[in-house]
Amino acid sequence: MNDSARYQNYHIVHAVKKDADQIKREDFKGKEARQDEYGTSVISIQMLKKGGFISIKNRYNHAVSYCDNTFNSNPDNIIPGLSSALKEHFNVEFSTTGSALPDGFVLMGDQLFKYHTEHHNIYYGDQAWAKNGTIHKINNVAGDALFDGFLFEDETKTLKKIDPAYEDSFADDFNRCYGGNRGLNVKNGNLYLDDNLLIGAEQSRIKTLDLPALTTMSDSCLFNAPFLTQFEAPALTTMGSDCLRYAETLTQFKADALTTMGNRCLAGSPDLGGCFKAQHIKPAFVI
C-alpha cells in the first residue's frame, strides 16, 4: 500500500523526536528492541477513518517483531490524554486497552484478533485476515485456504494476493505453472497437486515448498518468507532479484538446475549453512 492509498483510509500522525537524526541505527544493531530509543524516535499513529482500529508503528519497519504495536497501540502510553485528544481532533473512535496485549494480538473494533504477520495494516492469522477493522475468515468448506498473504481459491484453482499492492510475485509465478489445474486441493491446511504436497503450512504460515514445475521466480518472489524452512524446485533455472530475501528460518534450499540468481536473493537466511552450493550459478550471482 503506497502512502496516498493509506491516507485514503487512515488518519496518520507522525511524531518525531527532536534529536531523531542523532539516533543512529548502527548503534542498535544486534540488540534491537521494539521500544528502544531508536525505534521510538520516529513513530506513526494510524487511525482508521471509519473507526474501530488504531496502530502505532515505529522506526524499525518490521526489523523487530510486532513493531506495528508500539506502546501497545495506545496513545495514552505516549502522553496521558492523547487518545481523547486524537479522537476529538479527528472525530474518530477506536478501542485501546490499559493493559498490554500479548504479542501477536490486535484489537479490531471490539474483537481481539490473533495474527502472525502484518503488512500495510493487513493482519494475517490462521485461516483469517483482518483489514480496515474487519475480520475476514477463509471459506474452508469451499476448499479455500490462506498461505501467509496468499489466498488459494478452489473455484479457480489459483493463488491470489490478499493485498494487490504487495510487491511479491509468488502468486503469478505459481499460477503460471499450476494455475487452473483441477488436481489442486487442500487437505488440513496444506496445498496438494493430486497426492503430492506443494505447499506445507502450519496455522496458515508457509513452512515448506516443493514445486517441481517451477522454472522461474520473478523479482521479489517470496520476498518475505519468515516461516519457510524448506524449499525445493528441481526445475528452477532463474531467480530474479530479491527472491527469498527475508527467509530467516530457511535451512534447506534445493534447486539443482539453477543457473541465474539476481541480487539479494537468500540474503536473510543465516542458517542456510552449506546446504546451498553456488558453484554453478552465473558470475552475476550476488547476495
Image (spheres, rainbow, N blue to C red):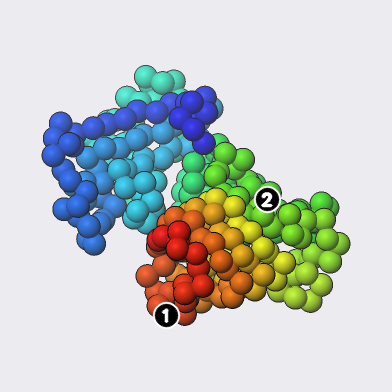
Q: Residue at the location (45% across, 63% down)?
A: 283
Residue 251 visible to the viewer: no
Number of labels in the image equals 2
Is residue 95 rendered to the left or right of residue 202?
left
Q: Amino acid at mark 1?
A: Gly
Residue 235 percent location from the top left of the image: 67, 70
Q: Nearer the viewer, mark 1 or mark 2?
A: 1
Callout 1 crowding tier (Cα within 10 Å): few <14, some 14–19, many ≥20: few
Residue 11, disc: none
Q: Taking 86 as reference, is 122 above or below it?
A: below
| Residue that protrudes farthest toward the right in the picture | 182
Q: Taking 53 as reference, is 62 above or below it?
A: below
Q: Residue at the location (13% across, 39% down)?
A: 22
Task: Point out the image quarter for the C terminus.
Answer: bottom left
In space, the residues marked 1 and 2 are separated at their CA atoms by: 30 Å
Callout 2 crowding tier (Cα within 10 Å): few <14, some 14–19, many ≥20: some
Task: Decide which of 149, 219 is in the foreground and name it.
Answer: 219
Q: Residue at the location (26% across, 46% down)?
A: 39
Is residue 243 rendered to the left or right of residue 60?
right
Task: Decide which of 241, 193 is in the foreground and name it.
Answer: 241
Is residue 20 rendered to the left or right of residue 53?
left
Q: Residue at the location (37% across, 70% down)?
A: 270
Q: Quadrant of residue 245?
A: bottom left
The kind of secondary structure element at disc 1 is: helix
| Residue behind mark 2 | 172
Q: Amino acid at mark 2?
A: Asp
Task: Decide which of 276, 210 is in the foreground and name it.
Answer: 276
Residue 158 percent location from the top left of the image: 75, 54
| Residue behind mark 1 | 274
The kind of secondary structure element at disc 2 is: helix
Task: Decide which of 178, 32 is in the foreground and name it.
Answer: 178
Q: Which mark sits nearer the N-terminus, 1 or 2?
A: 2
